[in-house]
Image (tube, rainbow, N blue to C red):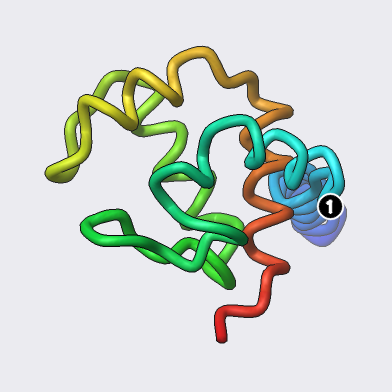
Amino acid sequence: MKSLFLSFFTLLITMHASSATSGDIAAGEARYGVNCFICHGQKGKGMASYPKLAGKPVAYLVDKLETYRAGTRIGPNSDLMIMNAEPLSDEEIANLAAYLSNVKSN
């Protein structure tokens, strides 16, 4: 019984992790092109005081976007990021994270 529980728990964790990290790269690129590039530069390479996002792990990107979407201030550009993240759906966040994590950081 204990083995069955552990197998089921492992399956749930794996399913959650894969759904949290999946996203449509092409849709993320299109959404990024709406306004993210203005501050973060083409392909998330970063500009001025706006950080490079290219090549960052999906979990990192999702966490930051969800934090901003919740209205939490976590850096000098928080007000701008909160305004831009608040309307994002979970799917848009997953897509943006998938796109940016797949962009070469060099």
- Which is nearer the eye, 15 or 8? 15
Q: In this orientation, does residue 100 appear?
A: yes
Q: Position of residue 89 (x, y in %)?
A: 63, 19
- Which is nearer the eye, 74 or 11? 74
**Residue farthest along the bottom direction in this orientation:** 106
The quarter of the rendered structure image containing the C terminus is bottom right
Q: Position of residue 29 (x, y in %)?
A: 74, 47
Q: Is residue 32 above or below residue 5?
A: above
Q: Position of residue 60 (x, y in %)?
A: 47, 57
Q: Position of residue 83 (x, y in %)?
A: 35, 18
Q: Is residue 89 above or below residue 45?
A: above
Q: Around disc 1, counting alpha carbons within 10 Å, would you say few (fewer than 14), some (14 to 19), or many (20 or more)? A: few
Report helix, strand or loop for mark 1.
helix
Q: Is residue 43 left or right of residue 75?
A: right
Q: Residue at x 78, y 55 (%)?
A: 14
- Which is nearer the eye, 6 or 56? 56
Q: Is residue 27 left or right of residue 98?
A: right
Q: Residue at x 35, y 20 (%)?
A: 70
Q: Is residue 15 left or right of residue 28?
A: right
Residue 100, quarter of picture: bottom right
Q: Residue at x 48, y 61 (%)?
A: 53
Q: In this orientation, does residue 1 appear?
A: no
Residue on which disc 1 sits: 11
Residue 46, quarter of picture: bottom left
Residue type, label 1: Leu
